[in-house]
Image: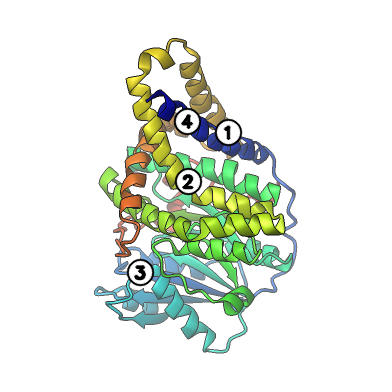
Amino acid sequence: MEAIFYGTQFLVTIFYFYFFVISLFGFYRKYIDYSLPPGSRFAVVVAAHNEERVIGELIRNLNDLDYPKELYDVYVVADNCTDHTARIAADNGANVIERFNKVDVGKGYALEYAFKEIFDKGIPYDAVVVFDADNLVAADFLSIMNNHLLRGEKIIQGYLDTKNAGDTWITKSIYISYILTNRFWQLSKYNLGLTCALGGTGMCLSTEVLKKYGWGMTSLTEDLEFQTKALMNNIKVTWAHDAKVYDEKPLSLMQSWRQRKRWMQGHTNVAGRYVGKLIHEGIRTKNFAMIDGALYLIQPFILMLTGIGFIGNIFMFDQVYDKPGWAIVGFFSQFFYFGIGLLLEKVKVKAYWWLFFYPIFALTWIPVAYIGFAMRKNKVWSHTLHIRNIKHENLHLYIPSKVDSRRTS
């Protein structure tokens, strides 16, 4: 028991210490010049399955972006829809691509179909931008992505924020999680020149890369699979901290559980196929970004080891917690260090109280990781129901942070 406990604690400590060191590079932001004129042409693609409650507001939002209208087109891929998603999208001015396939089900297949349809039109798009139907988008999103593209970046992830942060303790916890991830993970890795993580929405993909390597992503985490495939070809995902996307989060623990289980299924599946390849290629080419990418892929397994360590703590409570040091470390990380992250992101004061919910929510990731690993070969897509039809003009009423993107460092 002691050998397992201390061995597990050692591995988990090394892993989390590495993440801590990475996070330190999120304390500053590089100056980015957003003055480059509009020059990139975008195909804005929205993946939608039975999203009649929210699709209309997103299309209206996209039509109002602060970018020349002749330089972007909005496409909605209505994937196996049985409601009025396609009609509502068309009525609001989107180009609708309907797809009906009961065998190849899921967002990855839908995007593959949409990209082919769009490229077959022969329109010279420079990049494809992908959103989910429940999103709202900052007005300057495409302007910021244009600047990143013109500087030579090929795959760019936008800042993922929460549309309905204050609804329940679950959405409050997820909001805290995303804010901290954006600052202490995504921005940090961008500053270090490592590859960032694609988030499934708010991502900008160069058509040059898509056409050269193809999409071909059919796992339950098509974004993770594509970023890993790109990294294998030495193409890094970069980060646009000011290009904000607001995503609707699940309201209940069970809804969140189902969504995260799907993520863990896909994550462990991709990890099993690519961890060894990334490590081998990283060592062969002396490319540390690939090693770092492999460490990101093994996150579910670290969560499982964390669970083993947590159980070990219970059985060895008297030996481990005979001093107050553990409690002090926990308090420091939870309310001081994480609080700094919220301060850097200039969230409103009420959000700091939501840090009390966050550790409870974080613990639920452990059983999710185990279940996701056990079901990693199951590729059945689980749809998340979206109902919060918030107008983008009223977004500031629902989230405890600034809605407008910041164009200065």
Q: Amino acid at mark 2?
A: Gln
Q: What amino acid is at disc 3?
A: Gly
Do labels 3 and 4 touch, CB within 8 Å? no
Towards the viewer: 11 or 262: 11
Q: Is residue 248 something that shows in the picture?
A: no
Label 2 SS:
helix
Q: Secondary structure at mark 1?
A: helix
Query: Of discs 4 and 2, which sits in the foreground?
Result: 4
Report which quarter residue 142 is drawn in. Answer: bottom right
Q: Who comes first in sequence, dot 3 or dot 4? A: 4
Between label 3 and label 4, give the one nearer the viewer. Answer: 4
Name the one closer to the observer, 67 or 130. 130
* Residue ID at (51%, 30%): 10
**From mark 4 to mark 2, how far is it between C-alphas?**
17 Å
* Local SS, label 3: loop
Q: Amino acid at mark 4?
A: Gly
Which residue bears the numbered disc 1? 17
The residues tagged by marks 3 and 4 sit, at their Cα atoms, a distance apart of: 39 Å
Q: Are marks 1 and 2 in contact (CB under 8 Å)?
A: no
Residue at x 30%, y 48% (from the top left corner): 371
* Amino acid type at mark 1: Phe
Per the image, the residue denoted by label 4 is 7
Q: Which residue is denoted by mark 2 in the rendering?
A: 299
Query: Between disc 1 and disc 3, whose residue precedes?
Result: 1
Measured as percent of width and height from the top left, residue 11 is found at 51, 35
Q: Residue 179 placed where, x, y %?
A: 51, 42
Q: Is residue 180 above or below residue 35?
A: above
Report which residue position mark 3 lands on: 106
Quote the CA–CA distance across marks 1 and 2: 13 Å
Residue 13: in sight, yes or no?
Answer: yes
> Could you classify mark 2 by the number of other residues whose Cα lies within 10 Å: few (under 14), some (14-19), or many (20 or more)?
some
